[in-house]
Amino acid sequence: LLILGEPGAGKTTELLSVAERLVEAAEGGDDKHPIPILFELSSWTPGIPILKWFGQQLQKTYGVSKNIADPLTRQWIQQTQILLLLDGLDELGPTNQIDCIKRMEEILAQHPALSVIVCCRRKEYEQGGQQLRQLKGAIYLQAVGSAQIQQYLKDLGREQLWDDIQAQPELLQLARSPLFLTLLVVAYQKQSIRDRAMLFNAYIQKQLHD
């Protein structure tokens, strides 16, 4: 599966939510459920085979012994005992993104039963020109609708914030991103916020003050 979205659309949050459900399924006692493992593609080094990189990440991120990381990775993939959750494809940059996709395509072609979920920003993925054709489908996380924003703020007891947001086009546009909506809830104090930079600054100042 490919998860696409704009910056702040909740791609990583959605990936972690899926991971949580997959862990619960794997812990349910059914050995057929693969174990989800999260890797950050931003740490992939161009030229390194994907399988070797998986082994390196098992060492660095999950503390697996160097002596068994590589053979363990090959065993898990060959026996489809893991489900790969790969975040941050867009963070590689255009050239490395294309190279990484080609290498992932090779692995998926060799192991068609292997399950993989990849997250990427829509714009960077489309502009890259190289697609993950071995995946079975994709979802696009759309912007948050006005009714959803209003209900979210109502649930938080912040109805006044909704009144301010809908009266200011710049705030409403920012609020359509889950990330920026969350920041607005924390940082907005009736001040002028016209863009992301101003919102981040307001958020940082509020958190430092607190």
Image (spheres, grey):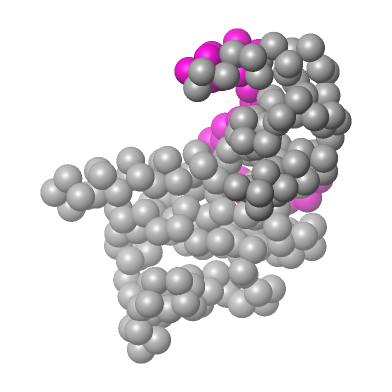
Residue drawn at 45 percent across, 46 percent down = 16
Can I make out residue 134 in this image?
no
Residue drawn at 77 percent across, 46 percent down = 201
> How many marks do you count on the picture?
0
Taking the magenta stretch, the answer to whether it contains residue 134 is: yes
Closer to the camera, 17 or 77? Answer: 17
Say if 155 sits above or below 21 in the image: above
Q: Is residue 93 left or right of residue 145?
A: right
- Percent coordinates x, y for residue 80 in the rendering: 33, 58
Q: Looking at this view, name the residue that lies furthest to the front.
A: 209
Residue drawn at 59 percent across, 13 percent down = 159
Q: Which residues are magenta?
A: 126-155
Say if 142 sits above or below 85 in the image: above
Closer to the camera, 53 or 112? Answer: 53
Residue drawn at 37 percent across, 64 percent down = 77
- Percent coordinates x, y for residue 183 in the rendering: 65, 37
Q: Looking at this view, name the residue that lies furthest to the bottom.
A: 67
Can I make out residue 130 in this image?
yes
- Percent coordinates x, y for residue 130 in the rendering: 73, 51
- Percent coordinates x, y for residue 21 in the rendering: 33, 41
Taking the magenta stretch, the answer to whether it contains residue 203 is: no
Q: Looking at this view, name the residue that lies furthest to the left.
A: 29
Residue 79 found in image quarter: bottom left
